[in-house]
Amino acid sequence: MNNKRLFALWILILFSYQSINAQYNSNLPAGKWVDSVYKSLSKDQRIAQLIIVRAHSNKGADHIAAVADDIKKYNVGALCFFQGGPIRQANLTNYYQQLAKTPLMITIDGEYGLGMRLDSVIKFPYQMTVGAVADSSLAYEMGLAVGRQHKRLGVHVNYAPVVDINNNPNNPVIGFRSFGEDKYKVARMGVAYMRGMQDAGIMASAKHFPGHGDVAVDSHLDLPVINKTVDQLQELELYPFKELIRAGVQSVMIGHLFVPAIDNTAHRATSISKNAVTGLLRDQLGFKGLTFTDALEMDGVKKYFPGGTIAVEALIAGNDMLCLPESVSGTIKAVNEAIKKKRLNWKELEAKVKRVLLAKYNLGLHRLDPINTSHLTEDLNEATNTVRKKIAREALTVVNLINPDGFRNDFFARPLTGKKVAYVGFNDEGSTTLAQRLKQDLNADIYYIRYKDVKGQGGTVVKQVIEGKYDAVILGFHDVTLRKGSNNFGISQTALQNWQQLNQNNAVTLVFGNPLSLGSFCMAKSLVGAYEDDAVFQNVAADWLNSRFNATGTLPVTVCNWKYGTGVIQQGTEVSYMEPVGDARFAAVDAIATEGIEKKAYPGCVVLAARDGQIVYHKAFGNYAYDSIGPTALNSIFDLASVTKTSATTVSVMKLYEEGRIDLKKRLEDYLPWTKKTNKAKLTLEDIILHQAGMVPFIPFYKATLNPDGTVRSDLYRNAAVEGFTTQVARDLYIRNDYKDTIWKTILESPVETPGKKYVYSDNDFWFLGKIVEAITKMPLEQYVQKTFYQPMHMTTTGYHPLERFPLTRIMPTENETGFRNQLIWGTVHDEGAALGGGVAGHAGLFSDAYDLGKLYQMLLNGGELNGQRFLKWETIQYFTGYHSSISRRAYGFDKPEKDHATSSDPYPSKYASQQTYGHTGFTGTCVWVDPKYNIVYIFLSNRVYPTRNSPALGRLSIRGRIQDALYKALIPAL
């Protein structure tokens, strides 16, 4: 047909819709309208109401004429639109409706909106992308927007959602169309998406019943086989369908699948199986809505039932609507012949036709308005990018970071501001939005490796990037195809070889495509799934790289060793796993930790162990209190007590020592002139740090602040922070600021025994060491350790004064104290002296979770380096952690095993710890031990002083040492 005829046809179409309102504008109630329409139809027209015809708006006059002929000649019941454009489809819909005796049900396969089929219309996110999102309200929001979009274009039925569970990664036809592998999430998102569409006034359709996810054959080409029992199907594949039926889905599309457990008749697809459609869907599951066959033109079913026979089989099976049979005339003829042969009867057909007509009424076809094409495309795209951005942001999935696996910061780490950044884009051609953003935001150097490049061409880029010594390298994979096919999602082997060379600790790999393509990046140091590759998703990724939000997405499918549901969830600058770390080897650790709770050694604890820089065990047990204030979490923050001595003061002294600013052989008066003319002046720093300077072990400073009846003195305390009284001691308790001077006067006046003669563990030693650090650095101790160690290592929970940075609910309570503060100590330091000193002291006051604390000690085990950044020299660590006293087991600042550890009947800290081990314990029920011989870091944090410090169970049960030995046995079975 020539162009002139096509032009004339379009002119006719453009002006044909004006008569629609007059022809179809009924005020009849539903039942009467259905009956009246049914009676107006001939028998052949009634059969034709069950037929859906293919329609395109991008084909020529011959196609349009053929569709029009089916409408005028047979009065078909529905059209299914495919490719084309929105204006053209609207005009054709108006034209076809004008031709139809009975209003046409307009359907489309728009799983991710009309953009799936039409040019000029922006796509909504794929269902697999939505499956990465935690909040199902976004699926509803997308469904509502998709429904309104369809309604605006005069589409009444959307063949969506896909509620197949994609539990076969080799599935060639479902994949990105599914919400994922988790049946519960597929059901939850499917229900939300369906409700959104139906609340917008269109019909949703759950597909492909009874579940097309676990197949490796495309039903467009052949008949897939699912060899599962009925119980297995009920447990998995059918679960989302049952949930959508319960939630009120209005239609179900039946897939072309061979499921012997349902119907073992040879080549009997579920779409033409009475056992499946009537027996299972209608009778067992109680579905009352419309059923659609999947396209009957698909080779998976038509090869065994050619011509009109397939339509007859589908109707006998119990289907209502026949989607895309081979021909309308052939279908009508075959159905009439089946009626004559009594394979079908008019009673059954009448029920189907009236069900279809009632659906049309409920969709508003009895009062049909023509589609207004004014601003149509703008209206269709109005909400899409807003929804896309929300879902892109919530879906972004940090699959893996090198840091959570091993206390490391030379990995890629946000924020990137101020760092030297490179971006390497792997794609087919052209620039990317992400590259433009990174250049603009971070002045990143931009490189590209094309999938078609030979290895040598990409190798040049690799060499430039490696020699550039970048702080962070962003590896972006673009133009990733939706299906794996034979070319690995379009990602070439040469590109992957180049990627492997760039996949270093400072690199993060972002994949903008089907999450199943992440299977090529199992060895990624840090890996992020970004799901889709348009400007919206790339801008969201750029925002994440710029630390403008934290990722909360999780994998919708299992990839490599990452199970569906995997995602590194970030809060602020913290990183925490969604799941604890540990396996069956550590059953004894679990048992001992639980025993401690059962026997009231502590209400809650966290145990962490790392070997060779990798976390091998990280679990939380119990609650904040025995009466369950809340459960202990992996990121719960504990009062470290005397672990402060090594974690703050000793490492600071080590840093100043190697800088030549501290000499352990010098005397206290050399650094603190105000100690001159006291009995402390001549004490050497070496004796002090070894606890053999002869000072008293403990001074109960608080007693001097109490009245004889035990109440606090009114001249020293206030119940709120006011001028002169801003030093917080506990909740609603503030001491006079100048009382710190009294503390130091008391220390200076305390007695001293002969130095170097006796080991006496003393907090006073570290009061002085903390003060020396402040004197040398001219900085408060808490600021110096933050600046020098904690901030560069991203130890976000480690520090003094935790309530200034975290809510109370993150912090473990300590003692329900009587005799001084008379309250539950929660969020302020437990040690009375440190509390009176303002919460900061060299011996106590530090708080941390286990994970962040582990970074500091992994740095020590690494010889002073963490993630390419050096904090201390190896020689300094060796020097300070070795034995240095002839009268004790002490190292400089650190505790160690006894020197006769190997033969001791009561080895400390545990039987299997080597003599190279160093660390410390804390009064609140904490410890940290580093064993260089076995490359092990062990941390135990508890609040054993709750509700009282007088509980001896932690020590009596040897919980800390037994757990340590159990970890050694699990990691080194030969011991």
Image (cartoon, rainbow, N blue to C red):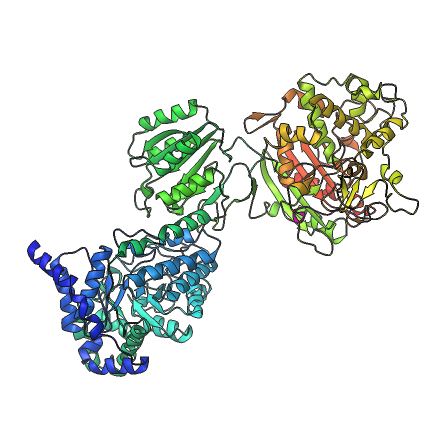
Q: Which residue appears farthest toward the right when viewing the image?
A: 708
Q: Does any portion of residue 918 appear in the rendered image? A: no
Residue 634 visible here: yes
Q: Quadrant of residue 964?
A: top right
Q: Is residue 598 above or below residue 346?
A: above
Left-right relation of 700 to 12: right
Left or right for 698, reference 654 = right
Residue bounds of the magenta highlight: 808-816
Q: x%, y% of residue 971?
A: 62, 39
- Residue at 37 percent across and 31 percent down: it is 498
The total of numbered circles placed on residues is 0
- Position of residue 114 relative to residue 705, above or below, is below
Q: Of 37 and 460, which appears nearest the observer?
A: 37
The picture places residue 60, in percent across and down from the top left corner, at 13, 56
State the image coordinates of residue 130 (x, y, percent, origin top left).
42, 53
Tell whether 252 sits left or right of 559. Answer: left
Quarter residue 512 falls in: top left
Q: Residue at x 36, y 73 (%)?
A: 289
Left or right, residue 239 beside residue 109: right
Quadrant housing the N terminus:
bottom left
- Place residue 630 in its image quadrant: bottom right
Quadrant occupied by the C terminus: top right
